[in-house]
Image (cartoon, helix red, strand yellow):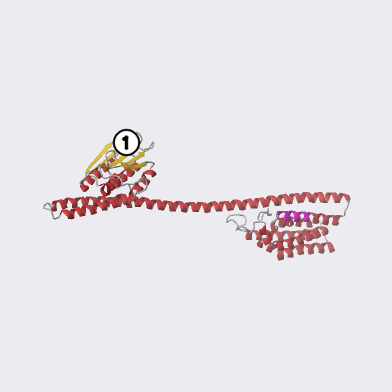
Amino acid sequence: MTGEATADGDEERAGVRSDAAPPAPDGPYAAWDRIVVWWDVVFVAILILTAIQIAVEGARGADLLLSYVAIAAIGIAYAVWGGRAARSRNQSAAAAYVVVLVIGTGTATASSGSAPLLLFVAFSHAWMLLERRRWAVVVSAALALAASLGILIRVGFAPEAVIVVPAQMGVVLLFAVGLGIWVAWTMRQGEEHARLVDELRAAQDALARSHHAAGVEAERARIAREIHDTLAQGFTSVVMQAQAASAVLDADDGAEAARDRLGLIEETARDNLAEARALVAAFAPAPLKEQSLAEALGRLVARFGDETGLQAWFVADGVLGLPPSAEVVLLRVAQEGLANVRRHAAASAVEVRLTRVDDTVLLEVSDDGRGLPEGFGFVAGEGFGLSGMRERVTTAGGSLSIGPGETGGTVLAVRLPLHDGESQGERG
């Protein structure tokens, strides 16, 4: 396309795309080169049929020769300029061709009554080759004028003919312009719709990639939390029990105490192995597979007491039939809460309390230890464990708070709402 055609990209076109953007993959211009081949076939067919009709109607001598010369000139001009303009959108070549087309059509109509058949292809080429709509209208008017003058030259300028011929050609012109504008608008709309569909597909693909990336990231974060809340805590316990076993070996009853510690190490390792297998298989936590949350928490607290030597209590009230998703969250929070007591509290006693009031379940992990460090804020100072707990609870629609107890120490509290239809029957 020429520089002039692309410089005024905001001007209305005659229905043919500009170089401002590539054709939409499924749009009307994506297969333009193949479409133009059919234009060529139709053009040649109309020229041949018009030439045959001129001979059949009885044109002879100079009229026949002049008509054939005009048709030949139109054909040659299309081969030199028109066909190239149809494919390259070169407006200089298109202008050269339409000049020959207007003159040739007027000359042929002046020599033969069948030559107006050329208007079928002439009007079409004006709208196909010229990108500016106003120039397509001007050329259409020039074709109508040339054809009218040709007919009047052939039939004479009688008063009746001077009125009738331009009137008839005016109707033809209005039809041609109306049809050309409609086709141009349809082509533009088709291209616009195809481009929008292409952009929508691209946006859907980008959104799908974004969702996939977000899902991968969320799954990574979930696995990290699961490993931290299960395997990492279990390994910490194994290390502490191994250290305790080593410390008591030299005592009088060291062998028996070490054997007890080794039993706890084996039990913890087996539990961790079950957790690892459940994590790999993406199942529910191993402690919840064959027992209720209350039973799993009771076992967790009892083992915690055995491992640490702390006084450990578990209290449950009205917590049968919790939804599995809530049980997973509460179990993981209890595991992390007890791990924090082990590492940071320097406590002598810990209590885990699980209660349910109406549609809310409350889990509290409280100790009588040293309390929170100075400057500990709502979020500031939280490590991976606390931040992971908070994210897990928030995702489930609940809330987590941590603060000093009424008589000292620290209280970790989780409130988890249970929505309608979530409660399940009592587990077996």
Q: Is residue 428 visible?
A: no
Residue 324 position (above or below residue 152):
above
The residue beneath circle 1 is 356
Residue 346 vs residue 17, the one in the foreground: 346
Left or right of 282 in this view: 128: right
Range of magenta residues: 133-144
Residue at the limit of the structure toward the front, as seen here: 374
Residue at 76% x, 59% y is 50
**Quarter location, residue 47:** bottom right
Q: Is residue 253 magenta?
A: no
Residue at 28% x, 51% y is 233
Element under disc 1: strand
**Quarter location, residue 337:** top left
Measured from the top left, where is residue 152 in percent x and y?
A: 85, 55
Neighbours of disc 1 within 10 Å: few (<14), some (14-19), many (20+): some
Measured from the top left, where is residue 64 in percent x and y?
A: 82, 62
